Each structure stands twice: as structure tokens, then as C-alpha cells.
Image (cartoon, grey):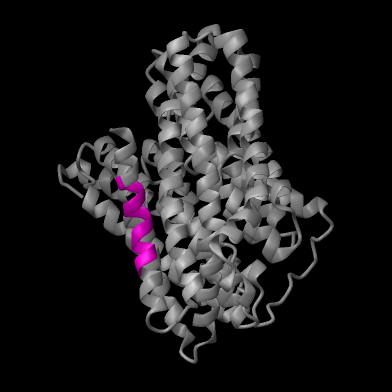
Amino acid sequence: MNFLKKLKETCIAVLPISAVVILLALTITPLEGALLVKFLFGTVWIILGLTIFLTGCDIGIMPAGSFLGAALTVRRNLPLLLASGLLIGVLITIAEPSLLILGQQAEKTTGNVSAMTLVYWVSAGVGLFLVLGLARTVFQIPFRLIIIAGYAVVFLFASRISPVFVALAFDSGGATTGQMTVPFIIALGVGIFSVRSDRSAEDDSFGLIGIASIGPMLAVVLLGLVSGTAGAEPPVGEGVPLVAANEQTRSLLAEYAALAPEILKTVALALTPLAVILGLYQIFLLRLPPRQLTRISIGFGYTCIGLIIFLLGTNSAFIPVGKEVGFLLGQLDYNRILIPLGFVLGALVVCAEPAIWVLTESVEEVSGGNIRRPVLLTALALGVAASVGLSMWRVLDGFSIWYILAPWYAAAIALSFACPRLFTAIAFDSGGVASGPLSSTFVLALLIGASEAVGGNPGTDAFGLIAMIAVTPIVTIQILGWLYALYAKKGGHA
């Protein structure tokens, strides 16, 4: 049963992080009993919410995207295809859980931008670059050319804005490619390429996500330029507890009642426009039979309910507990323990992320079995572990994110010239796979708390985590793709 499969995947993703929190709470970072109880209940809500959400995506959102992609391509109307890509790209991204969480954390931490303002700008960026990705397949534009030009523009403008917006911009690129956006865009692409018979259709089916993920970065960079805070410094942490005593002891029901109105409003703003647009496409373009329409409608309902429950769990438990644990760790005399803890959390996030297993299977298949799943999984786990460990180090010492991101992205671009084109497209598609919802909830919150404890700038020192996690698969897969090309000539195996 699909629901039980999703439940198993979600448990595997969430429970290891929960176990680490409980272990810390029982040892070096003791939590108030009431807060720990909230965390345990929050874990249940997150597992249940994500399970229902992902089930809804599978039975409703993805089929809708596939049907829509095929219908648009059969019409052979390029303006309609591109306009639909823009509209759907914007609306589907607004409903992305990881982006909603990132926006909320950015609003509370930096005060420079509201959550929904960030979400709308990022969504516009995804829509525009999704159009560019679709146009690439029509006009046969080389994937590498778009990637190099896109990142060059992003880095050029990013050098002129506040460090807060730099970190937030690159985080947005990773947070956008999540549970909602990726399946729908992939389904849209599958629908489009399924009706093509030319030889390049399979190769063109990769790279759409990689191109679309540049849009959020550029959008937030431009937001930083027009917001009037290009030279502003972010607020400095004051070293005060992030979870007040009254919040720790407030009853669960009171907590949920306080959070419910804002969560319901957020979900309504995120999903209503998408529902309306899909309804209009059904009336004027798709005309699906009642059985398929009913199934998609039920899936959409699951998605809505799951998103509400997920946001309830993150806002009531994972985010406040993550901040509190980070704050307590940052106050320790031996707060350098954050660095090895980052390695552990990074490895757990990768190994427990269901999308990573799908990715490793895809790469093994594309490489003809030469790049085996254990090799790729180990490489990704070590890479992301190092990225999260470096993020912890950056929180403690406060050095610029440019010292890490610039070399990583330079390596990613350089490898695109040595790696087979198909692997490059897959690598850039996979950038957001490792940065699942746990990265934008618990791990980022932990970094914010630690930054507050050491008197740092959470806006510059904590944000950037998702970006560092997201760039790891881009480099790792291209390195293995390059090695695969070398070994393939000799008939060996990676």
C-alpha cells in the first residue's frame, strides 16, 4: 500500500534525528520535561504529516503534472507551453513545505524580509527559469551554457548585497527543490518528453530541476538589491534563551491553538491558487474523466491535510527544540562539539533521506552499474557530513560563507567540462535532493540557536546551511561521472 510505504520512508528520515535529540536531552543538553514532550508529539505530527502529504503528491499532484505536460505538448503551442510552465512553476513552488519553513525562519531571525514575500519572489524565480528550461529543450540550447551563464549572473549580483541575502539566496535554491516542486516538475517533464520521439528527448529530460533551481537564487539576490538593505548588517545575537519559560511549559493544546490560525492561513495561501489553476486547466485543456479527476482531487486533499499537520509539528516542536538544543550546545565550554555533531547530523540527513536512495538507483542505472549505489551513497554521506560540519564551524568562528560556496561552485562548473553531459544534468538536478525538510527545520534551527548562544549573526552564520548541503551532490556525482567515463574506457567498475 502506498501510504504504508510512505510511512516507512518518513519514519526512516525523521526518527534518527529524533533519537539524536533525545540522546542529547538526556546527557549534555537537558531540556524541560514539557518541551521534550512537545518534541515527541511533534515527531509524530511530522511523520504523519509528511506521510499524508507525500501520499497526496503521488496520487494527485504528480499525475496532474504528467497529464498536463503531455496535453500541452500535444497541442504543439509553444507560447501556451511556456506560459503554462511559468504559471505552474510559480504556483507549485508557493506550496513547497521546505520553502515555507525557510521563509518563516528567515522572517523570525533576520527581520529583513517577510516569509511570504520571500516565498513569492522565490516562486517567481522558479517559474521564470522553468520557462528557460523548457525553452532549452525546444531550441536545443546546451545545458552547460545556461548553467554557467545563470550562476555567473547570480554571483555577480550576490557580490553587491548584504551577507544576509547572500546566504538566504543560496539556501533558497536548495529549499525550493523539495517534496512538492521536484515531483511535479519531473512529472511535467515526463509528460512533455513522453510524446517526443527524437533521439535527444531522454537527455533533455534531465536538467530541468537544475535550471529551475537557479531562479530562486537570482530572485533573492534581486530582492536584496531592491529592498534597500544591500549594505545593512544583520542583527547580532544577544546570547539569550530562544525558548522562553512560558513557551516551554505552555500546554500542547494551547500551543496548537495559538499556531493553528497562521498555519491554516499559510496553507490556504500556498494551495488555493494551485487548485484554482488546475481546475481551469481541467475545464479548458485536460478534460480528464471523472474517475481520474476524483483521484487527483483526493490526492490534493491529502496534500493539504498533510501540509497542515507537518507545519504544526515543525512550528510547535522541531524548530523551537532545535534552537534550544543549539543554544545549550553553544553555551558549553566545549562548544566545539558542534562540529562533530554536524558531521553526524549531515550523514544521518543523507542516509535517511528517501530521495537519496532514488537518486543513487538512478545514477547506477544510467552508468550501467559502473557507479554502484554503496559507492555513491558513501560519497554523498561524507560530502554532506563535511558540509554540515563546516557550517557548525562557521557558526562558531563567523567566517564568510563565500570561503566555502565560491570554491564548491567553481569546482561544480569546472567538472561540467570533464564529466559526461548526462551526469552533469543529473548532478545539477540532484542539488536539492540531500537538503530535505529536516535540514530546513531542525538542523537550521540548531545552527540559529548556536549562533545566538555565541553572540554571532544568525542571519549570516546560520543561513547558508541548505546551500552547502545542496551543492554537495552536484560536485560528488560529477566526480563519480568523470571517474565512470575513465573506467568505462577500460571496462572497469567504480
Of 117 and 31, the residue lying toward us: 31
In the picture shown, does residue 121 fall above or below 317? above
Which residue is located at x 45 percent, y 81 percent?
29
Residue 9 in view, yes or no: yes
Image coords of residue 86 (percent x, y): 64, 27
Give how far across and how far down residue 226 sits, in percent.
82, 51
Residue appearing at x 56%, y 44% in the figure: 148
Q: Which residues are magenta?
A: 8-19
Say if 466 sits above or below 31 in the image: above
Q: Main secondary structure of the magenta part?
A: helix
Q: Identify which residue is drawn at 71% across, 64% down.
A: 110
Q: Residue 15 vs residue 109: left or right? A: left
- Image coords of residue 307 (percent x, y): 53, 43
The answer to if 68 sits in the magenta stretch is no
Q: Quadrant of residue 268?
A: top right
Q: Is residue 244 visible?
A: no
Residue 383 pos. (x, y %)? 38, 62
At a point 20% along the width and 43% down the height, the residue shown is 370
Furthest residue toward bottom: 333
- Total tally of numbered discs in the picture: 0
Can you tell which quarter of the image residue 79 is in? top right
Q: Is residue 323 above or below residue 69?
A: below
Front-lying residue, 47 or 391: 47
